[in-house]
Image (cartoon, rainbow, N blue to C red):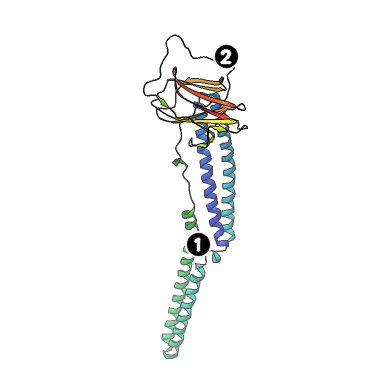
Amino acid sequence: MMASLPTILLILAGLSLAATGIAALIAVRSQREAQSAIFPIVREEESNRAQRARISIFVWTAVTALFLGGWLATLQLVPPSEATPSESTVAEAPSDQVEEAALVSNSTEAEAPTESSNIENTNLVETEAKVEAEESAEVKVTILTPTAISVAQAPTPTPTETPIPPTPTATATPTPALGAFVLATTGPRTPAPPGARIGPIEFASDITTDLEPVNSNDLFTNGVETIYAIFPFRGMRKGLDFTIIWYQNGTELAREEGEWAWGEEASSYTFLRTRGEGLYKLELYVNDTVVASDMFEIK
């Protein structure tokens, strides 16, 4: 039982070290997205996520150090003679060989002259010395075995398999009705590029790190605090005017405006802090053209 404890502690230390690496990747990614985001809400959320990841790094580092310390302590406590069950077998084999050698020596002494007996005694001493040397070598090999096994069994998860989604767009700061900017209805209007496509929009109460919706629906119960809108896009290019407008019961509730900076084709999202029951609508503009819109209800 004691022989397996160092292996278990080393495996746990490896898992803790892997968790520390994952937390470090999340912290770096969130900090980078917070610095590149143009919307204040996105910067705030990514900064909070980076702070939580840094706390996780500290915790997992402490846990890793604890497991490694326990591993080193258990290696010092386990006696070499009890390191593995196979050592008893290795130790027993030489004693059997010594007994057989002793029997052969006794029978030879009964039949041979004194000089041959002395020669055989000398051979017996040499045989015992060789056996002790072989036993010492075998014990050394056995002692190294737990370390080799623990290294081979220690898992090392690779967090880089998870693709990093493009920086999302988000909104949660309502714009007062008196200061709301209204898209021009007179004068020249700039249409969206012919190949620009956004949607369909999918509403959900939460999302995963891969921008997959959680609890997707168009009807939510009163009390939900945040609604996420996930949408694919293609044919976009950097520098296009991009506008997000949220409505509640036909009245503009919030607006975000900026330049597109999230690539040509991928998926992104925006979100809204809800204000109770009502019929909500989301409109996405490229230049002066509505390229996607959809509604959901809270009651």
Could you tell whether 195 is left or right of 74 in the image? left
Q: Which residue is mark 2?
A: 179
Disc 2 crowd rating (10 Å Cα; few below 14, some 14-19, many 20+) is few
Residue 171: tell me if it is visible: no
Q: Do callouts 2 and 1 mark residues in contact (Cβ within 8 Å)? A: no
Q: Quadrant of the N terminus?
A: bottom right
Q: Residue at x 58, y 16 (%)?
A: 177
Q: Residue at x 42, y 89 (%)?
A: 113
User: From the viewer's perspective, is residue 115 above or below residue 217?
Assistant: below
Which of the 4 image quarters holds residue 240?
top left
Q: Which residue is nearer to you in this view: 3 or 200?
A: 200
Q: Position of residue 272 (x, y in %)?
A: 56, 27
Residue visible at 47% across and 82% down in the picture: 102
Give the crowd class for mark 1: few <14, some 14-19, many >=20 residues within 10 Å.
some
Residue 290 visible (yes or no)? yes
Q: Quadrant of the C terminus?
A: top right
- Pick the residue in front: 253 or 172: 253
* Residue shown at the point (47%, 74%) measured from the top left: 93
Q: What kind of element bears circle 1?
A: helix
Residue position marked by numbered label 1 in the rendering: 143
Q: Amino acid at mark 2?
A: Gly
Q: CA distance from mark 2 to mark 1?
A: 77 Å
In the rendered structure, which disc, 2 or 1, sits on the residue that comes first in sequence?
1
